[in-house]
Image: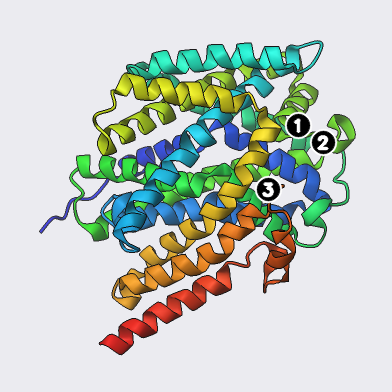
């Protein structure tokens, strides 16, 4: 019998590693934007944001632990074809479609744009991202321990900077929260819930969770029960850190309208807040740290996606693969941060409900004997609504929005929940009937 477990220090170390993996510089741009738009409803909106931005990633880590540390095993319960498609979609989302380009866009918005006297331009964005993704390609050829060490050193520095920023903003607020706008006027919690999709942490956790479980196995933890127990503790440590960051940044965003004004994206808001509260030196330091953090994240995601392609299609050389990834990410990043976020919304709305269903069912799989029909029914039920819901956020299929809103819970943005429950129940009763 294997009685090995992690010490308290080892658990803390893996928990902080998980926090560092999640705290991508890109995630820092969403809470300030939420705070500005939610205004006086900032806390209910932030709670909704925390559900998908913190709660779901923790559950995803637990789900991966209960599945033996394998995303493919989680997906196989739906079917063999789904087990190929869903992991690929997850890697594409956190990779060259959104995750990697976002690192370049955020680095430009925070690292360079505040210092351009003439503001943003197509040329300055292209030159910056060309250099950024050229460095990404070069470093990804051999993602050495140096990049990891830079990341480890930057995370504490970034947390300290954010702590100083939050403390200063709480002691001397920039202003008072304005009235909520947009979806925050009526459904602050559920609008915040959907905003949490943008962090992509729930689907990223399906990949990061594999890394965490691997670190546990290296320390001799092999039983699923012990792995799950420690995954919960690690997830809570990382979750507390993320929650504190998100709460403080959302508060700063809610008080920034008077001095910073309403802005198109959170990158501009964050730099405006830093300039107002910390001055030029503070802004310079924040810009530098976030730019380097974006680069290390870009290298990590590029090499991870390259290694994934090597596993599923080994005939493609690694060098060629990361070259294509870097070039594609360069093109995507030149959409600009605001346009990139708008482009990513439809796909995230399609993916997230399916990911949520998989995560929840995997955690509670023993209650229905892990029957694949329950997984299939719930995933199909969620996808039937989430796919047209995502499409309704595009110009081509904008007319679908009236249909989505007319569905139960549609106005709140969670119309997929009831079909997913119905699908799961149908699968459950079919399994009972056969037995």
User: Are the two marked residues, 1 and 2, in contact with CB atoms closer than 8 angstroms?
Assistant: yes
* Quarter residue 150 falls in: top left
Q: Quadrant of the N terminus?
A: bottom left
Disc number for residue 256: 2
Calculate the distance from the C-alpha at mark 2 to the C-alpha at mark 3.
30 Å
Q: Quadrant of the C terminus?
A: bottom left
- Which callout, 3 or 1, points at the residue further toward the start of the chain? 1
Which secondary structure lies at badge 2? loop
Closer-to-camera residue (13/206): 206
Which secondary structure lies at badge 3? loop
Which secondary structure lies at badge 1? helix
Disc number for residue 394: 3
Question: Residue 174 location in percent, x, y?
Answer: 84, 34
In the picture provided, is 308 more to the left or to the right than 360?
Answer: left
Residue at 54% from the left image edge and 11% from the top image edge: 131
Residue at 44% from the left image edge and 80% from the top image edge: 425
Question: Residue 305 location in percent, x, y?
Answer: 38, 33
The residue carrying pointer 3 sits among few (fewer than 14), some (14 to 19) or many (20 or more) residues within 10 Å by Cα, namely some
In the picture provided, is 29 more to the left or to the right than 173?
Answer: left
- Which callout, 1 or 2, points at the residue further toward the start of the chain? 2
């Amino acid at each position: 019998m294997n009685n090995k477990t992690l010490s308290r220090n080892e658990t803390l170390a893996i928990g902080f590693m998980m926090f560092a993996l999640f705290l991508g510089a890109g995630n820092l741009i969403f809470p300030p934007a939420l705070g500005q738009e939610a205004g006086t409803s900032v806390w209910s909106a932030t709670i909704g944001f925390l559900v998908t931005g913190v709660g779901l990633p923790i559950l995803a880590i637990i789900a991966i632990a209960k599945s033996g540390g394998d995303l493919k095993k989680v997906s196989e319960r739906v079917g063999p074809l789904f087990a190929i498609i869903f992991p690929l979609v997850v890697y594409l989302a956190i990779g060259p479609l959104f995750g990697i380009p976002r690192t370049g866009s955020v680095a430009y918005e925070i690292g360079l744009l505040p210092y351009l006297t003439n503001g943003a331009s197509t040329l300055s964005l292209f030159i910056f991202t060309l250099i950024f993704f050229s460095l990404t390609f070069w470093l990804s050829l051999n993602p050495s321990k140096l990049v990891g060490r830079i990341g480890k050193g930057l995370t504490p520095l970034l947390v300290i900077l954010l702590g100083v920023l939050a403390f200063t903003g709480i002691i001397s607020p920039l202003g008072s929260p304005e009235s909520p706008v947009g979806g925050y006027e009526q459904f602050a919690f559920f609008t915040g819930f959907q905003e949490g999709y943008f962090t992509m942490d729930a689907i990223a956790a399906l990949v990061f969770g594999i890394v965490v479980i691997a670190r546990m196995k290296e320390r001799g933890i092999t039983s699923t029960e012990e792995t799950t127990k420690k995954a919960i503790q690690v997830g809570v440590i990382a979750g507390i850190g993320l929650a504190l960051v998100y709460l403080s940044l959302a508060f700063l965003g809610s008080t920034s309208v008077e001095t910073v004004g309403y802005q198109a994206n959170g990158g501009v808001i964050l730099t405006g807040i830093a300039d107002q509260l910390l001055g030029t030196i503070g802004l310079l330091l924040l810009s530098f740290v976030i730019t380097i953090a974006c680069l290390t994240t870009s290298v990590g995601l590029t090499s991870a996606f390259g290694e994934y392609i090597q596993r599923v299609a080994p005939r493609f050389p690694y060098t060629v693969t990361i070259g294509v990834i870097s070039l594609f990410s360069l093109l995507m990043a030149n959409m600009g941060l605001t346009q990139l976020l708008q482009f990513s919304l439809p796909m995230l709305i399609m993916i997230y409900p399916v990911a949520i269903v998989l995560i929840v069912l995997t955690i509670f799989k023993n209650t229905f004997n892990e029957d694949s029909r329950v997984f299939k029914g719930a995933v199909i039920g969620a996808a039937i609504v989430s796919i047209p819901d995502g499409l309704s956020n595009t110009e081509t299929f904008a007319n679908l929005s009236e249909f989505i809103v007319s569905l139960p819970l549609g106005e709140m943005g969670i119309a997929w929940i009831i079909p997913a429950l119905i699908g799961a129940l149908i699968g459950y009763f079919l399994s009972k009937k056969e037995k």
